[in-house]
Amino acid sequence: MIKRRLIISVSFCALLLGCTKPTQPRWEGIAVEKASFDQVWEVCLTSLKDRGLKVDRQDRRFGLIVSEPTIGEQFFEFWRKDAVSSDDVLLSSLHTIRRIVSIQVTTQGPRKFEVRVQAQAQRASIPGDQLDNTVEAFELLNRQGIPASPSRRDYVRPQAEPIWVDIGREPALEQYILEDITHRLKS
């Protein structure tokens, strides 16, 4: 009887958890006062540059800065700074991870702004070779530049391009950049 009640209550809790609506990810943000738009903008650009992130796009009218996709640092790359937590470094060491950081600067009033940061991580997924016949299987195993058959001397198998799969946000990197921006604006 007790086992039955336990199973029913656990099933009910699992059912309730399964029915919850996923929350929309929110950008982390800070309020900035007593600064000009140009000061805030330059501090944001400098903060990205110091993390080793190159700026891909910047639109002052919409207040948006987006970094280029940057391949994540690995455990032996101590000079790089794009991963903040040890979990992020471990993940970058096990998989090919790239990060894209977006900074949104919105005007809240005269000399009053809100700065929001979003760091998105993506994992590379490289499709494998598809073998359609035994000649292609032989070519796959014999990739020293020697064609498998005389009739296919001009055949070169193209290198597969990675497909980038979103794996989520990196709140540690977002928080670090926000703290860096705050510190730079106060000094």
Image (cartoon, rainbow, N blue to C red):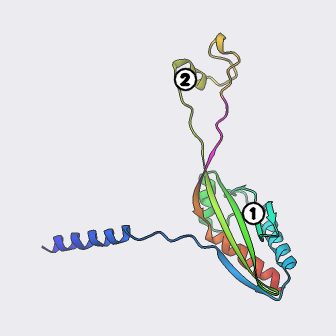
Q: Amino acid at mark 2?
A: Ala
Residue 161 colored magenta? yes
Q: Nearer the viewer, residue 103 or 125?
A: 103
Q: Secondary structure at mark 2?
A: helix
Q: Which mark is residue 137?
A: 2
Q: Main secondary structure of the magenta part?
A: loop
**Which quarter of the image is occupied by the N terminus?**
bottom left
The one of 105 and 4 positioned closer to us in this rendering: 105
| Disc ID at residue 66 | 1
**Closer to us: mark 2 or mark 1?**
1
Q: CA distance from mark 2 to mark 1?
A: 43 Å
Mark 2 near mark 1, Cβ–Cβ under 8 Å?
A: no
Q: Position of residue 164 (x, y in %)?
A: 62, 50
Magenta stretch?
158-165
Residue 119, quarter of the rendered image: bottom right
Above or below, 99 relative to 20: above
